[in-house]
Amino acid sequence: METPNVGDKIADIDTPSMIVDLDLMEGNIKKLMDKLLPTGLDIRPHLKTTKSAILANKLAKAGAKGGCVTKVSEAEVIAAAGFDDLHITCPIVGPAKVRRLVELFRKYRQVRIVVDSEIGASAINDALAKSGIEEPILTLIDIDVGLHRTGVKPGQPAMELIKYVGGLEHLKIIGVQGYEGHLQHLHDYEDRKTQCLESMRILTSTAESFRQAGFNIQVVTTGGTGTAEFCASVPGVTELQPGSFIFMDTDYRNAVGTFYSNSLTILSTVVSKQGPRAVTIDAGLKSLTTDSGMAECSDPRYKYNEFGDEQGSLVWEEGTPDLAVGDRVMIIPSHIDPTINLHDVYYAYRGGVIEEIWPVDSRGKVQ
Ligand code: PLP
Ligand code: MN
């Protein structure tokens, strides 16, 4: 099999391939860091987007402090690939997963977890008690700040949970997490801001009530690409978790604008002409997800539609230059995280030449 190498021209590689414009990606990282590092908050990018230890290290070099993953299996591969300052953002439940967590923690002591239930917390505590590991695992209480996905309800339920967790020898409480995922893609700036500030009020006041009850709450972690700047403006927030900003997608661009650039595209080839203003390209559902709407051609004159598993179509208005069999196009994904999960590697290029090749380490790691 012919595999592309560093130094090859993007124009020569097989398709569909996932390609990254390095200038644009580096620009996105710089824009985020320039905006958020001066706030003094820790930036802990969510690696559910890149799924890459190499990119986690690049972000750390630019000023990030650690990274987030959602699942234990992601943490396993990202840590093994060389980046182990990891916060797992989803509660870890079930005997098999808890056993995996214990083995992960045996190897990588920086790993942090969240809990949102007594059942979940006590199972992890029991497993750690049996493991012979003396050091407690750093633990945050996950608070529901409006997404209703995970997180204990604020107020009395949260207070009861932290008091319970406070009595567990192998869990060391260091903070709270509250993720306002339902707000990230709200198109109206003022609406997104107002609702985010309300979520932050819930999160920071919960943290404060925990402190008053005697708990040592150092970390208050939250935020995504669509809200990080609002979260950063709230006293009491200490850490931000944006992920998608590094590559963006059409859904995020439509919501938050073009401050960050679409730096990742799927390079595709026209394989068939289907009429005067229609062609078929080799990127379909197995190359691009459509959960957030259709992807877009980087040249907006050509409209993309999926054409089943393996192909897509491009159509255009009269007067637009024709596409012909063999032409190559770049397609911008509508939702970056699950699209990256469909690919083995990134080809990162500058000036049309591949400069770096990065594996998608945690591709398929959903457990
Ligand atoms: N934090 C958590 C808990 C998330 O689930 C996500 C994304 O879903 C993020 C942060 C990052 O958000 P984004 O990719 O929208 O920047
Ligand atoms: Mn996403």
Image (tube, rainbow, N blue to C red):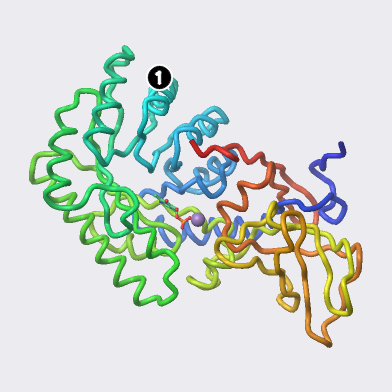
Confirm if mark 1 falls within 8 A of ligand 1.
no
Query: Which residue position holds label 1?
Result: 106
Q: Is residue 125 above or below residue 204?
A: above
Which residue lies at the image location 79% right of the left edge and 42% below the top edge?
6
Which residue lies at the image location 27% right of the left edge and 57% below the top edge?
145
Residue that extends furthest to the front in the rendered view of this protein: 308
Residue that extends furthest to the bottom in the rendered view of this protein: 319
Work out whether residue 209 or residue 150 is closer to the camera in this orientation and state it.
150
Give the left or right position of residue 93, taking residue 212 as reference: right
SS class of the residue under badge 1? helix
Residue 351 visible in the snapshot: no
The image position of residue 159, as x and y in percent, is: 13, 44
Residue 298 lies in what quarter of the image? Answer: bottom right
Work out whether residue 357 or residue 333 is closer to the camera in this orientation and state it.
333
Residue 51 visible in the snapshot: yes
The image position of residue 165, as x and y in percent, is: 19, 33
Give the left or right position of residue 154, taking residue 279 as reference: left
User: Number of numbered discs present?
Assistant: 1
Give the left or right position of residue 3, taking residue 213 as reference: right
Residue that extends furthest to the top in the rendered view of this protein: 132
Q: Is residue 196 above or below residue 2?
A: below
The image position of residue 226, as x and y in percent, is: 43, 64
Q: Quadrant of the N terminus?
A: top right
Residue 54 lies in what quarter of the image? Answer: top right
Work out whether residue 343 or residue 57 is closer to the camera in this orientation and state it.
343
Which residue lies at the image location 44% right of the left edge and 54% below the top edge?
242
The image position of residue 339, as x and y in percent, is: 62, 53
Mark 1 closeness class: few <14, some 14–19, many ≥20 residues within 10 Å: some
**Kind of residue indicated by mark 1:** Arg
Residue that extends furthest to the left in the rendered view of this protein: 213
